[in-house]
Amino acid sequence: MGLEEYKKKRDFQKTSEPKGKVVKGDEKLIFVIQKHQASHLHWDFRLEVEGVLKSWAVPKEPPKETGVKRLAMQTEDHPMEYAKFHGTIPEGMYGAGTVEIWDKGSYELLKKEKNKYAFILHGKKLKGKYFLTKFEKAAKNAWLFFKAKED
Ligand code: MN
């Protein structure tokens, strides 16, 4: 995917969000969840995959427990530096509103297929095995995000 769509949507003269580039890190993989009070409150779940942050907007608080499935709408890939971003996106800009870091940590990738990710999150709020699975027939960017049943 790359970052073209991310850059196209933003005016970096006006927003303090990072401009970003694709980064190939050799350290631990990271994830971040940003609580984003835009026109609609949502949580942006971002997972480091191949030098960028794969991103999903989750309209309700991400689940800490099993048994709760959350809709997650895939959005454009974000640059790695975005994991540190918090603050205010100015009015009139894409995503205008406030961004705070709700959770972050490292993660272990267990499985990555076209329509399915399985991973272990090591965050403060989210810990343990999670899945992201894409709906086959529903709206094209719709995924489900949920915690695996303990076994
Ligand atoms: Mn957002």
Image (spheres, rainbow, N blue to C red):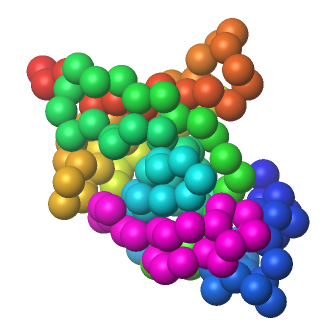
The part of the image, by quadrant, that contains residue 128 is top left
Q: Nearer the viewer, residue 131 or 13?
A: 13
The part of the image, by quadrant, that contains residue 24 is bottom right
Q: Nearer the viewer, residue 70 or 104?
A: 70
Residue positioned most to the left: 151
Q: Nearer the viewer, residue 131 or 33?
A: 33
Is residue 76 in view?
yes
Is residue 31 in view?
no
| Left or right: where 45 falls relative to 7 | left
Residue positioned most to the bottom: 13
Q: Which residue occupies 20% across, 54% down?
A: 125
The part of the image, by quadrant, that contains residue 66 is top left
x and y percentages locating residue 44 in the rendered image: 49, 53
Q: Which residue occupies 30% across, 61% down?
A: 103
x and y percentages locating residue 39 in the rendered image: 59, 53
Above or below, comparing residue 18 to residue 61 in the picture: below
Q: Which residue occupies 65% across, 62% down?
A: 95
**Figure disc tally:** 0
x and y percentages locating residue 15 in the rendered image: 70, 82
| Left or right: where 106 falls relative to 70 | left
Query: Which quadrant is the C terminus positioned in?
Result: top left
Q: Nearer the viewer, residue 108 or 137?
A: 137
| Left or right: where 80 falls relative to 83 | right
| Left or right: where 148 falls relative to 50 | left
Span shown in magenta:
85-106
Above or below, comparing residue 56 to residue 37 in the picture: above
Q: Which residue occupies 75% across, 69% down?
A: 92
x and y percentages locating residue 76 in the rendered image: 71, 52
